Image (cartoon, rainbow, N blue to C red):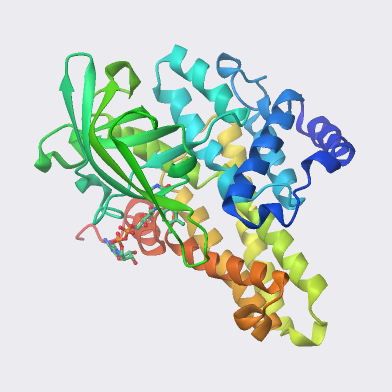
Amino acid sequence: MELDEFRTSLDAWLDQHAAVLTPDPLATETLDGQMAHLSVVKRHTYEAGWMRWGWPQRVGGLGGSTLLRAYLGEALTSRGLVEPGIYSMTEVLAPTMIDYAQPQLAAAMVPRLLRGDETWCQGFSEPGTGSNLAALSCRATRSGDVWRVTGQKVWTSLAQYADRCVLLTRTGTPESAHRGITALFVDMDSPGIDVRPIETMHGAPEFSEVFFDDVAVPVDRTLGQEGQGWSVAMDLLPFERSTALWHRAAYLHRRLQGLLDTVRPDMLDPAAVGEVTQLLAALRARSRATQHRLAAGEHLGPETSIDKVLVATAEQAVFDLVADGLGPEVTIGDEADSDRWRRAYLYSRAATIYGGTAEIQRNIIARRLLDLGSGH
Ligand SMILES: Cc1cc2nc3c(=O)[nH]c(=O)nc-3n(C[C@H](O)[C@H](O)[C@H](O)COP(=O)(O)OP(=O)(O)OC[C@H]3O[C@@H](n4cnc5c(N)ncnc54)[C@H](O)[C@@H]3O)c2cc1C
């Protein structure tokens, strides 16, 4: 299906099915409620075919351009039908499964994620090993047909809901750095896994500590080859910084429009509104180019760090404007709306951390794109 036809038909379908797809504001105040509603939206959009477009047929998709996926997420987030962060985990994890899992495993698992039957998580960061990912120490030791995994992850988004985890483990010596890492696809109900949710400052248990105590993972759950985990990670991270960010840009537009609809115009500095609008336009232009490169089959790499810097800057600018425009309502207001704005404001502070910090993105841009700091 072509993008124009997809867009028109999807918009009409979303209008027709608004009653079932629109979240109940009270029920979706909590992360539990948002996750439950996400499953409903995914199931309906999958069964109607929309969620399957843009994914390969070998994993239950209907084929077509990846732009179709970008538009579906844009339509759902800009209408407020899903929360972009939890919706877009599919964009982060499914492409990696498709590229690195054994074909029959990908074919069995990806449809469950697309249909909303399952949630997956990304087990990369460890205490003391976030930016310096190559130093990770969660160990996997081969024993016949299984890996035995022992160690700890932290900040694992949605781990308490997750059925599976894309997990980075140390299989080489501690000194092997990026060469000794292996990626595994782990069932989260395996004996020996203990998930302990952590509450963020915006008041939701969005991520968790995850402990692994001699957890058995079949060797056929290895993503790629033993020792290839760094490539898996380097291919996954650009996905975290591409279509997922297109969806987030749509969400930010919606929140800015919501602010403009809520506050009296004289409460906002026109120059600040102009600045935020310009940041969002730059983000959208950049992300649009990334979507087209992905659709053309190009391999995404370090250049997606620019998209990440732009989204983090834009997100914080949008919510700085919210804080300026709504003032005390955001900081101390008791109303449900104030609380919603406050939580979104607080969450925006995480934008320069998740998916790689702003400093690390700038290091990547300097070293890998501009060839700076290489000692000349
Ligand atoms: C909302 C949220 C969701 C997340 N979800 C997940 C998830 O699902 N899975 C997962 O694996 N992780 C997740 N993370 C973790 C995230 O990837 C890490 O927090 C991030 O990579 C930073 O690592 P760190 O927390 O260990 O900080 P550190 O790496 O310790 O960094 C601390 C500070 O030092 C700076 N710094 C570090 N090294 C350098 C350097 N070389 N040059 C300049 N500055 C440097 C950083 O920029 C930062 O300001 C999530 C984080 C957040 C906030």
Q: How many numbered tags mark residues here?
A: 0
Query: Is 254 displayed left or right of 331 in the figure?
Result: right
Residue 204, x across and y down, in percent: 52, 59
Q: Nearer the viewer, residue 221 or 135?
A: 221
| Quadrant in the rendering for residue 283 | bottom right
Residue 39, x across and y down, in percent: 64, 36
Relative vertical location of residue 168 with respect to residue 135 in this rendering, above or below = above
| Quadrant in the rendering for residue 339 | bottom right
Relative vertical location of residue 90 with respect to residue 190 in this rendering, above or below = below
Q: Residue at x 53, y 64 (%)?
A: 347
Please state the quadrant of the image where ligand 1 appears: bottom left
Query: Is 142 displayed left or right of 80 in the figure?
Result: left
Residue 148, x across and y down, in percent: 21, 27
Query: Is 128 displayed left or right of 161 in the figure?
Result: left
| Residue 245 visible to an observer of this rendering | no
Q: Quadrant of the N terminus?
A: top right
| Residue 190 visible to an observer of this rendering | yes
Relative vertical location of residue 274 with respect to residue 143 in this rendering, above or below = below
Q: Residue at x 39, y 61 (%)?
A: 362
Q: Quadrant of the C terminus?
A: bottom left
Q: Nearer the viewer, residue 371 or 305?
A: 305
Q: Nearer the viewer, residue 361 or 108?
A: 108
Q: Residue at x 55, y 59 (%)?
A: 311
Query: Is 300 displayed left or right of 268 in the figure?
Result: left
Residue 174, x across and y down, in percent: 11, 41
Relative vertical location of residue 38 with respect to residue 117 in this rendering, above or below = below
Q: Residue at x 89, y 37 (%)?
A: 16
